[in-house]
Each structure stands twice: as C-alpha cells, then as structure tokens.
Image: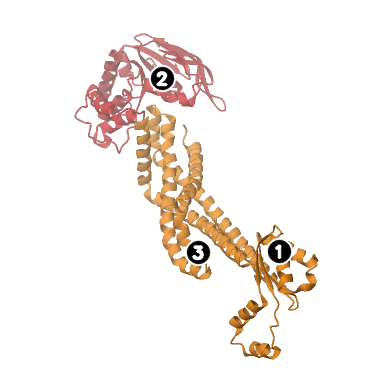
Chain colours: A orange, B red
Amino acid sequence: MFVSIFRVFRFAGRNFWRNIWLALATISIIILTLISISFVELLNVLTQEAVATIKDRIDISIYFKPEVTPEEVINIKRKLGQLEQIKTITYVSRADSLKILEDKHGQDVLIKESLQELGTNPLGDTLVIKANDIGYYPVILAALEQSQYKGLIEDKNYEDNQAFLTKINSVTSKVKKIGWMVSGVFAIVAILIVFNTIRIAIYTKSEEIGVMKLVGADNWFIRAPFLVEAVLYAAIGTALTMLLLYPILEVIDPYILSFFDNGFSLVAYFVSHLVAWVLWHFVGILVLTITASSLAVGRYLDV
Amino acid sequence: MIIFKGVTKKYPPQVYAVDDISLHIKPGEFVSIVGQSGTGKTTLIKLLIAEERATCGRIVVGGWDITHVKQSQRPYLRRQIGVIFQDFKLLPKKTAFENIAFALEVCGKSDQIIKKTVPQLLRIVGLEEMGKRYPRHLSGGEAQRVAIARALAHRPKIIVADEPTGNLDAITGREIVDLLKKINNFGTTVVLVTHDRDIVNALKRRVITLDAGHVVSDKEEGRYVL
C-alpha cells in the first residue's frame, strides 16, 4: 500500500511537469483567487479594527449647568453607575473643565477675552460616560432625557460619532460585497481552469491509462494521481500567495499605521495569524481544486 | 476455465455483435477463434475482459461469474487474463523493461519483485538483452514479445491474443505463435483471435469459427474453413 501511495505521488508529479505551462496558468488563477479573498478578509479586519477604535473613542459627555453643585453631580454619577449598560463614568470638575478649555484654546484671543470679561468660571461639571456597547448609548440618553435630572443638564454630545460609524459600516460593506463578488468570479474561473487542466492531463495520459486498465491497475490508483495533482495546485498556490502577500502588505502597512493611532499593523496581524491563514486558504482552495478534479475524473476517466 | 452460455451483445439500435453464443474452453487449452472482420471476435474478447457487458447470457471465468462484474472488481479479473493486441499497446516513452515493469508497478508490486520478475519475463520471451530499448528501436516481432512479457507479468491463467500477428510478416508471426504455444505448454490457457489461415492450420488445435455473431463451427484440431 505504501509503495502504491508513493507511486501515486510520483505519477502526479510527472503529470504536473508534463503539462508545466498549463500547471503554471492554473496556479496563477488560484493565486489571484486567494489574493482577492485575502484582501476581502483584510478589509474585514481593517473595518473591525477601525470600528473598534472609533467605538473606543465614543462616549457621552454630559455638561451640567453651572449652578448645579458638585455634590449633586456626584450623586447623579452614583445613581447612573447603577445602570448595567454603563461601563465607566468619569467626573470632570468645572475647574478641570476650564483648565482643559484653556489648554485647548489658550491661544484663541476671543475665548481668552470672553473668559476675562466674565470674570468667573462659566462652565459646569461634566460627566463622561462610556457604555458597555455602542448600542446602549441611545438607551442611556433616553434614560437621562426622562430622568429628574433633565433640567440640570446644559448639553450633551453623541450624534456625530454615530453618523461616522454608520458611514464606515456602509462603505466597507459595499466594498466587501464587491470584493466577494470578484473573489467568486475568480473562484469559478479557477474551478473551470482546474477542471480543464485535469481533463487535458487525462487526455495526455490516455494511452498510459488504457494500459493501466488493461494490466489490472486498481481504479483508485488510476484516479488518485489526478486528485493528488489537484492537491499540488492548492498547496503551491497557497504557498505562493502567502509569499506574495507579505511584500504587498509591507508596502501597504505604513498607510495603515498612519491611519490607526493605536499602532495596528497589517504585517504584524498577517504574521501572527499566518498559520491559521495558510490552513484556511489551503483547505478552502483544496475543496475547490478537488471538486474540479473529481468532476473531470468522473466525466473523462472511465474507471 | 471459460464458459459462455447463451451470450448476446446487442448495440443500439438493433446490431447484434454476438448472438446467443455458448462455448466452453477448458483449462490449458489452446483455442483459435476465427472469422472474417465484423463477425464478433473482438466483441467476444471485450466481453471476456469485462470491457463490455453482455446484453444477456452468462460468462464465467475460472469459476467466477463475471456477467455483471462490478467496475471495482474488473482489475482483479484483468490480472487473471493477460491480453495482447495487434498494435502492441506499448508506451513509447518507456523502455521494454519499463513497459513490463509498469504492469507490476501500477498493481502495487514492490521494486524488489519488479527487479526480479522483469528479467525473468524478458528471458521467457527471448529478449533478455533488449530491456533498455525503446519500442521505436524494436522490430514488430520484438515489440509483440515485450507485449507478451507484459501480459505474463501477473502470471495469468489465461492469455488472450487479439490478432497478435496482424502487423507482422509470416515468419515473425509464426515465431509469436510458437511463443504462445510455449506459454500454453506451461499450462496457461491461450485464446488466439485471428484470421490468419496458415497459422490456424499449422496449429492443429481447437478452432471456433464465428460468422455474423454466431458460432458456426467448433472443432478439435480444426482448420480455417471460411
């Protein structure tokens, strides 16, 4: 049995070399398919990362009226803290708020003069609320609107971030849709090309196959080299795709790094997930090539 | 050894290649099947090696009813029946040695067995010095000997020769038949399909004559009478 398996691999290798140009064309289309799928997957990762970064930045700032005392605000903080939707609440005193304003707009003459003219701190205390999930913000806002504290609140900000997130999700979902469509087209082309490559391999070997049948070769032994050939295409295609992806990502990475201020790197992501990526891409493309090869063998190899 | 019982092979729409053939070939026999072209000789061979299925009737080889043999069982049948053809069916990119070895390789025989068996087979067919030659460097007779050696690779109980002398001159053809006789003397059943009158008459063995898909004559020490 071991001898036969070894020979099956030898025969498959021989088939591969015998039609080397056809094999290269087949591998090229497999690489295109895998790169296309990889980009869709990477886009998915980037979207998730972007959304996570933005989500992390999202909070609700509740600005209280200046006449509301710090004790009242701290009391409200304690009560809001009982809501399970809320992750953290940070209290920012009016003095800190003023300091932040001065630090941020200290050079702005108009703001400086306005503050001098007022003579006192016009700002109230602020509560900065972070929710456990982005979906909870409307719930928290609604709770505040209906609460007894409504009259104490000067202003609150939230709307802009939500619009930005919706826009990101909408654009990326459209790009992903196009990406999957392109990958689907490549996958269909890959199936057709593998099917035809195996068909031609069967024709090229028809004389040999005839003799094999005549002398009593097992049916599996006649079929197996063509299936192994499909495995070879998948393995070489996956390996070359990974080798090509690395330099491509090296080129893209600086742009990604400059976009995310949390140091997210595509190359680092790729390297840390390499084993899983190789495995999934190989298994995926293997299913595709084996299917195409089995169809060709079933149709053109009468065993 | 070989039993055909009321075997008919019909091709659509209404072409009867063989029609209600019954015959019994005993172990160790040397039988010639003769007849003009299109009388069903090759169909009979195809039925015997399960390349075609009988439309009706029964075919038994070595006690094994192969009438409805499954595709997965065909290889085992074919290892019991060595077949040689008029056009030799040798692989041109393989040497004589490799062509014979190929039959053993594809059936899972080890390299040691192959190295031991192939020279023996080449010796049996008288080509022990020609193992390294490619088919294009062999004469027709030598190529047919390689094909016979390959057919013997699995030590089959039956050798079926379909017009083995068709591409050969008379003297070479006779040499090939002598080789088949030699193989038959070792106890292998030989079924020779031919329309070479001289060879059949010189053999003085059993002759089955086909005409229009029917057995019209079956005689011990028969002659070519068409």
Q: Which residue is mark 1?
A: A78
Residue B160 position (above or below residue A203): above
Quadrant of res A140: bottom right
The CA distance from mark 3 to mark 2 is 84 Å
* Letter of the chain that mark 2 sits on in the rendering: B
* Corner quadrant of residue A203: top left
- Tell me which chain the residue with mark 1 is part of: A
Task: Identify whether A106 is placed above or below B9.
Answer: below
**Residue at the spot of label 2:** B35
Question: What is the secondary structure assignment of the residue under circle 1?
Answer: helix
Q: Secondary structure at mark 3?
A: loop
User: Label 2 crowding class (10 Å Cα cut-off): few <14, some 14-19, many 20+?
Assistant: many
Residue at numbered disc 3: A264
Q: Amino acid at mark 2?
A: Gly
Q: Residues within 10 Å of mark 3 (few under 14, many from 20)?
A: some
Q: Amino acid at mark 3?
A: Phe
